[in-house]
Amino acid sequence: DLGLTEAVPPAILYHGTATKYVDSILAKGLVRGTRNHVHLSADLETASQVGKRHGILVIFSVDTAAMLKDGLSFHLSDNGVWLTEKVPAKYLTKIG
């Protein structure tokens, strides 16, 4: 427990990544791996900056409104990064 307080995110968040991860993300969704949480961005610019660090950029939109409706929770870190435990593939749309 990192002591983070739950927060309600915007209806859509973004996740920037590299093309080499797309097949896995579409199959398994976004998983935290070795991190405590999946990291999401509130804007495309930030998601793009993050994704470019890993290779050829791909951005997914995350239907956070549907996730909240289905009982998944979110936290907002002090540096503006949205955090959640996982994002099942059904909430993801590849947008770029």
Image (spheres, rainbow, N blue to C red):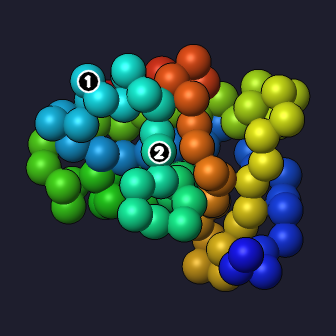
* Number of disc labels: 2
Q: Is residue 12 visible?
A: yes
With respect to residue 72, does 34 lie above or below?
A: below
With respect to residue 13, does 46 lie above or below?
A: below
Quadrant the N terminus occupies: bottom right
In the image, 68 versus 12, the foreground residue is 68
Mark 1 or mark 2, earlier in chain: 1
Quadrant the C terminus occupies: top left
- How many residues crowd around disc 1 within 10 Å: few (fewer than 14), some, or many (20 or more)? few
With respect to residue 18, does 32 lie above or below?
A: below
Q: Is residue 21 left or right of residue 16?
A: left
The picture places residue 52, in percent across and down from the top left corner, at 21, 54
The residue sitting at 78% across, 40% down in the picture is 72
The picture places residue 66, in percent across and down from the top left corner, at 76, 25
Q: Quadrant of residue 34?
A: bottom left
The residue under label 2 is 31
The residue sitting at 85% across, 35% down in the picture is 71
For residue 23, which numbered disc appears in the image?
1
Marks 1 and 2, how far apart in space?
A: 13 Å
The picture places residue 57, in percent across and down from the top left corner, at 22, 42
SS type, badge 1: helix
Q: Is residue 36 left or right of residue 65?
A: left
- How many residues crowd around disc 2 within 10 Å: few (fewer than 14), some, or many (20 or more)? some
**Residue type, numbered disc 1:** Asp
The residue sitting at 62% across, 51% down in the picture is 85
